Amino acid sequence: MKKSKNILTEKEMELVQILMSDCETTGDIQSKLKRLFAGTIEQMLESEMEEHLGYDKNSVLGNNSGNSRNGYNRKTITSDYGQAEIAIPRDRNGEFEPQVLAKRQVRTDEIEQKIMAMYAKGMSQRDIEDSLREIYGAEIPQTMISKITDKILPEVNEWQNRPLESIYPIVYFDGVVFKSRKDNQIINKCVYTVLAIDMEGHKEILGCWLSENEGASFWAGVCSDLKKRGVSDIFVACHDNLRGLSEAINATFPKTKNQLCIVHQIRNSTKFVPWKDRKAVCADLKKIYGAVNLDNAEYALEEFRETWGKKYPSILKSWDANWTELTTFFEYPQEIRHLIYTTNAVEAYHRQLRKFTKTKAILPTDDSIRKVVYFSAREITKKWTMPARDWGMAYSQISIFFDDRLAA
């Protein structure tokens, strides 16, 4: 028979006896705990005042001491026990600075932590406001909840500017769109995520950049930021042909190979293909990216050109224009290919991000977007404890193909 883990001390048992008296329901216990909480805070404040003045309450030592008690201020404090009114002693000189309950503090740290936790789980400010009212009887408006969550912004900035590893074998680039307000209009803001696989095979978000427009100058800034934070080399960069990104990567990390996402290329290729031809077109495209080597892929491309070139010239135009960066993965064995031919790693992260932010239809400011993304990323990455699939085999091939750069 298992023993209870809740072994109480003698003093704790005395407290339990106090709570048990005149209590018939859990609500009665909660009410009494609230009174005990308020009373304990007030007694602690009284002790702080005595230490501040240097004499006990009503002591003759206070006569002509230069400072004395001057009544009380009353403040409503919100805690795990709900809202309670606290009497705060004051002195005539106005020098008393309580520590247990700081000036202008109207919530305990536990309540703020709960607000942060609810926000991190994807709850909207309205939902948090309603939950606090229902659970604690506390009226904390959305504007106050926003101010509380704003306290995380210095941590967000620190995370965004933290030092990085010098080498990342694989880095993925992709964006996710949020609705935001600007000049009383609803606009799209894109958060571009840079997600890497490090030398141990673990996924890591290197940073998130917010922009209304992508382009060469934007991506040059992102790559420059990565370099300033310590990144000296990227072996393979995987992305969806984001405008200006390849050029920015080549300018900042000249040895990096660019691999365009094959899955995105297939989607774009079949976007305007009628349903009656789509299955056949996809089958012939698969012969290209599913080829054993580059020679076979080029042969499959020419076969596709003969079959579909006249009917769907735009497909061939896209493959021809991006052929070099679409076929980078053919340079490596299968152990590396399956990690770089698609940006699925960062897209999967963005799908999870969407789940965390689905209750936030419109985010009013850039800071609100940064907070939501950071909180969500912190929750999502808690589960990233295992290396990429078959990383041991992949790393053995990486160490062969990039031996000279690893040594450097």
Image: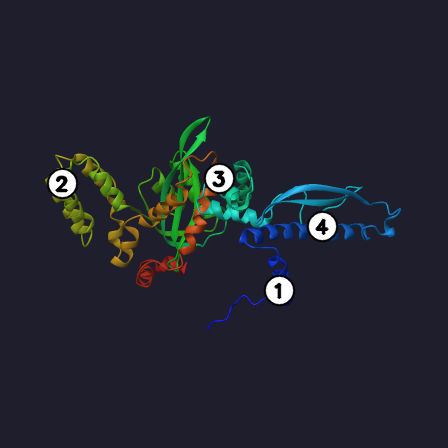
Q: CA distance from mark 3 to mark 2?
A: 55 Å
In-front residue for pair 403/93? 93
Farthest residue toward the right?
64
Q: The residue under label 4 is which amino acid type?
A: Leu
- Image coordinates for residue 41, horizontal then vertical, percent: 67, 51
Q: Secondary structure at mark 3?
A: helix
Residue 17 lies left or right of residue 304; in this view the side is: right
- Image coordinates for residue 403, horizontal then vertical, percent: 35, 60
Q: CA distance from mark 4 to mark 2?
A: 83 Å
Q: Which residue is mark 1?
A: 13
Q: CA distance from mark 1 to mark 4?
A: 25 Å
Q: The residue under label 1 is which amino acid type?
A: Met
Q: Which residue is mark 3?
A: 125
Q: Which residue is mark 2?
A: 305
- Image coordinates for residue 355, horizontal then vertical, percent: 38, 45
Q: Quadrant of the C terminus?
A: bottom left
Q: Which residue is mark 4?
A: 45
- Image coordinates for residue 84, horizontal then vertical, percent: 63, 45
Confirm or deny contact between disc 3 and disc 4 (CB under 8 A): no
Q: The residue under label 3 is which amino acid type?
A: Gln
Q: CA distance from mark 1 to mark 2?
A: 84 Å
Q: In the rendered structure, which disc, 3 or 2, sits on the residue that comes first in sequence? A: 3
- Which one is in front in this view, the residue at disc 1 or the one at disc 2? 1
Q: In the rendered structure, which disc, 3 or 4, sits on the residue that comes first in sequence? A: 4
Q: Residues within 10 Å of mark 3 (few under 14, many from 20)?
A: many
- Which one is in front in this view, the residue at disc 4 or the one at disc 2? 4
